[in-house]
Image (cartoon, rainbow, N blue to C red):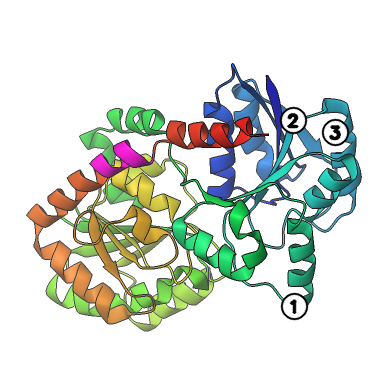
Amino acid sequence: MKKILLYTDTPQRGGAELQMFLLAKFLDKAKFTPILICSNYRELDKWCANFEHEGIKVYRLNVKSKHDPKHYFQLKKIIKEEKPDLLHAHIWNPASGRYAYLAAKSTKTKLITTEHDPFKLSTIKDFFKKRALKNVSKIIAISNDNKKVLEKLYPEQKKKIQVIHNGIDITWWQSQLLRFTDEDRHHIKEDLFHAQENSLIVTTVAELHERKGLKYLINAIPEVIKKFPNTKFVLIGDGPNRSDFEHLVKKLNLERHVTFLGRQKEIPKLLKSSNIFLLPSIREGFGLVNLEAMITPLPIIATKAGGIPEVVVNKETGILVETEDSKALTDALLKLIAASDLREKYAKAGHKRILEKFDAQKMATEYGKVYDKF
């Protein structure tokens, strides 16, 4: 049986961290023993508890930030104690995970990485990253687009790069949706969305950050509500640019048509209470939330950013538009809002696509094949 150390220096939970959990959960336990190593930040407590609930050992590093050199010393100590077959570092930011490279090299441990959101670094960071990657045995990209980015940034590592798409826990999602009732929908629309029973709901789940392109969505809304005044836009999530987006909504007199919900727990029920899912990202490594919307199932409007076109098929499971284009978002919204049959068609096709291609069990099996080679 192979022992796999899953390491991250992330300060918070997000899509990359969910994939780490699903990988650990669905790995073949007859062949692999996953162990999580992460920081002792409070924000990770519940995430770590999920691993422990699955019977997975968790190490918490006593560190102050991803820059803290204690990562290296504590990680090195754990490696010496556990004697793993592999160290698998999840790189949530291209400059993260620095101490995994050093610890693996000093202990002569095989290292593979998953690059969740690659982009060009500053000159000095890029120099150190290129040096570090020389000692990596395998680099996993979560989309074909990410693979192209990595090959361009690190052409000398081209042969090491492989794509394994993210996945979702289909059984869990279906179990949540089975519990959904008309009473739930009524409560959510009235008390959370602040919408009327006959309102059409367009929902976005995203960090409220400029890279998510939310200002282009907000600027698309005025033309939509002129023709369909009973449309309500719901933004789920929080982030550094929330006040900017709220100010823009106020400036455009859209308060009655846009609701900011902040972070929410019961995402399946919130999506099930919606009619259209929209993700207007400028940059997106994969767009995991599109999978969650498609399994619900909902028709998708999204941008052609990063790995999104590998999930959402234009004019089959939704409508894809160029990034930073409010008019294109307006046109897509007007088309879908006006055609319930088209919404239903896209939703059914999206649901089928997720079942066939993006099951977390399949993702874990593909990682298992990689682990088997070392």
Amino acid marked by disc 3: Ile
Image quarter where the C terminus lies is top right
For numbered disc 1, what is the local secondary structure?
A: helix
Q: Residues within 10 Å of mark 3 (few under 14, many from 20)?
A: some
Dominant SS type (magenta): helix
Q: Is residue 73 visible?
A: yes
Give the residue furthest to the bottom: 251
Give the residue displayed 85% in from the left and 51% down from the top: 102
Q: Which residue is located at x 19 percent, y 61 percent?
A: 315
Q: Nearer the viewer, mark 1 or mark 3?
A: 1
Task: Name the side, left or right, on which 231 lies relative to 71.
Answer: left
Relative to the observer, which residue lies in front, 171 or 238?
Answer: 171
- In the rendered structure, find residue 66 and report the number of the disc placed on it: none
Is 42 in the magenta?
no
The magenta stretch is 352-358
Q: Earlier in the sequence, mark 2 or mark 1?
A: 2
Instruction: Name which residue type carries label 2.
Output: Asp
Q: Residues within 10 Å of mark 1 (few under 14, many from 20)?
A: few
Residue that mark 3 sits on: 78
Q: Quadrant of residue 302?
A: bottom left
Magenta residue check for 355: yes
Residue at x-position 77% and y-position 52%: 135
In the picture, the disc for residue 85 is 2
N-terminal of the pair, mark 1 or mark 3, is 3
Q: Nearer the viewer, mark 2 or mark 1?
A: 2
**Residue 236 location (% of width, % of height):** 42, 56
Quadrant of res 194? bottom left
